[in-house]
């Protein structure tokens, strides 16, 4: 422990908290950034310094950090019924209302909603649904699930296996069996010289088909993808990528799971990115913006085909043995329901469409810095990637130090961003205004100028 910090929050943190995704040696030297308050798109630390939360926390606090209606919804539900569960046909009104509302909003016809507490649990539930589904319909060999390199689907044993990032596998003995990874549709980084976006998308779909053929189509149960990859560096696919991918999936009768944990609820200027990218998934996972992060809650939509198989399976086995103590927690459900009402009543998706052009323009303007290799994004999500050589796209070595340095400088200027290697992500609250977008990018430009 750093003795000079005395009995401060910082020293107590170093002494006792094990932080996710943290370099422990560096943390013991610097201590935490303790956030103590929030107001709109801003958060503040112990010293009273304000920051624009350019990442909505972790891609989640869509309505910012002081939405009174969500506080009231939580309080009211806590006073009415603080907890009841969903097991064995028990239910509560917020759970029922939320599921009903979600089915109305779904981008493609869906049959039922299963609740969990985190994105990882929603992914795990989807994996188990795939396996249960194929067992129930008499295809027990069709169990492998394909995700993509650089995809992010969570950190539980199975969801971390689907995640396609080395740090989530190394030293954890992952991925588990039956999980495969196909190529990342990152045109700027992965395309061959002179390859068009269209040809690149075709090649990506062919790579998927080759993998399916090599493994045996009868063994492939499902494919999972984020419409826009988030934690893998904000990768927006070529325009026709998902059309081509879905043709391959249909050819081999492979289920499609859309992971809308980041994109769902307005991030791309549509309620769901499945609409933006013309996806027709059999299952959809959502979390984060579902409750604007004011309560932990996630959901898995399943279509009628899956539900019919679950019903058949349960009739045969006796019980559908899956669920969490807090599945459909009434306080979380009440807050999520109120979040969805705010999205509608305040026309949040229309607002995103109004400001996203300006956001993307200011992001693209960062290309003027000669250490920025690519700026990319869509809607109110984006990233810029730092490179040692702009023309040759040469990454910095070792990977990550430049991203960390620039994110630190942005923090000093009063903007919280997230470095993923040398790509820096932006995912501000959906309520951000044009003026606040300017303020955020002005600060980022100051940080980049200082770094040069
Ligand atoms: N799926 C996606 C696309 C995510 O971005 C995340 C988290 O960032 C998850 C799943 C996992 O969610 P959680 O951290 O709530 O388990």
Image (cartoon, rainbow, N blue to C red):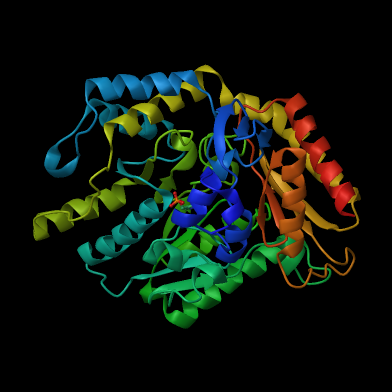
For residue 309, what is the image quadrant?
Answer: bottom left
Observer able to see residue 145: yes
Q: Position of residue 128 (x, y in %)?
A: 30, 60
From what the image shows, is residue 213 above or below residue 80?
below
Residue found at the far bottom of this picture: 214
Q: Position of residue 296 (x, y in %)?
A: 39, 40
Question: Where 176 falls versus 133 (above or below)?
Answer: below
Left or right: 16, with 167 as reference point: left
Quadrant that contains the C terminus: bottom right
Q: Give the side of residue 12 with respect to residue 372, left or right.
A: left
User: Could you say which is closer to the camera, residue 252 or residue 386?
Assistant: 386
Horizontally, is 385 left or right of 390 in the view?
Answer: left
Residue 303 at x, y percent in the picture: 34, 46
Quarter occupied by the N terminus = bottom right
Nearest the camera: 275 or 36?
Answer: 36
Where is 291 relative to 406, above or below?
A: above
Residue 442 sits above or below residue 305 on the image: above
Kindly tell me whether residue 361 is visible in this rendering.
Answer: no
């Amino acid at each position: 422990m750093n003795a000079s910090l005395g009995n401060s929050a910082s020293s107590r943190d170093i002494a006792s908290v094990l932080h996710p995704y943290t370099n422990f040696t560096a943390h013991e030297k610097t201590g935490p950034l303790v956030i103590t308050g929030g107001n709109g798109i801003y958060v503040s630390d112990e010293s009273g310094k304000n920051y624009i939360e350019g990442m909505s926390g972790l891609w989640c606090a869509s309505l910012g950090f002081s939405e009174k209606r969500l506080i009231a919804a939580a309080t009211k539900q806590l006073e009415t019924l603080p907890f009841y569960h969903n097991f064995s046909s028990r239910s509560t009104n917020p759970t029922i209302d939320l599921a009903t509302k979600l089915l109305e909003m779904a981008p493609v016809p869906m049959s039922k909603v299963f609740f969990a507490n985190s994105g990882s649990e929603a992914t795990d539930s989807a994996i188990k649904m795939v396996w249960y589904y194929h067992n129930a319909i008499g295809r027990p060999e069709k169990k492998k699930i394909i995700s993509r390199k650089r995809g992010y689907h969570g950190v539980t044993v199975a969801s971390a296996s689907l995640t396609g990032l080395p740090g989530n596998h190394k030293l954890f003995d992952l991925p588990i069996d039956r999980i495969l990874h196909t190529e990342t549709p990152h045109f700027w980084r992965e395309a061959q010289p002179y390859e068009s976006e269209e040809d690149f998308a075709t090649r990506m779909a062919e790579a998927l088909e080759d993998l399916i053929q090599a493994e045996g189509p009868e063994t492939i149960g499902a494919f999972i993808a984020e419409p826009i990859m988030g934690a893998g560096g904000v990768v927006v696919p070529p325009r026709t990528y998902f059309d081509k991918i879905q043709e391959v999936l249909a050819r081999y009768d492979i289920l499609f799971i859309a992971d809308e944990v980041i994109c769902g609820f307005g991030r791309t200027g549509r309620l769901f990115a499945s609409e933006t990218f013309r996806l027709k998934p059999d299952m959809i996972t959502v979390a984060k913006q579902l409750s604007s992060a004011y309560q932990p809650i996630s959901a898995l939509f399943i279509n009628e085909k899956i539900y019919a198989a679950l019903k058949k399976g349960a009739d045969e086995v006796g019980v559908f043995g899956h669920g969490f103590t807090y599945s459909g927690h009434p306080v979380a459900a009440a807050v999520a329901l109120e979040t969805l009402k705010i999205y509608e009543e305040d026309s949040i998706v229309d607002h995103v469409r109004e400001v996203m052009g300006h956001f993307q323009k200011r992001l693209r303007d960062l290309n003027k810095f000669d250490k920025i290799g690519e700026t990319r994004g869509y809607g109110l999500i984006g990233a810029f990637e730092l490179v040692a050589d702009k023309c040759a796209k040469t990454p910095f070595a070792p990977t990550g130090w430049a991203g960390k340095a620039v994110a630190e400088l942005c923090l000093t200027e009063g903007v919280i961003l997230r470095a993923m290697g040398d790509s820096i992500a932006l995912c501000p609250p959906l309520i951000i205004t044009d003026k606040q977008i300017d303020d955020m990018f002005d600060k980022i430009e100051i940080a980049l100028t200082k770094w040069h």
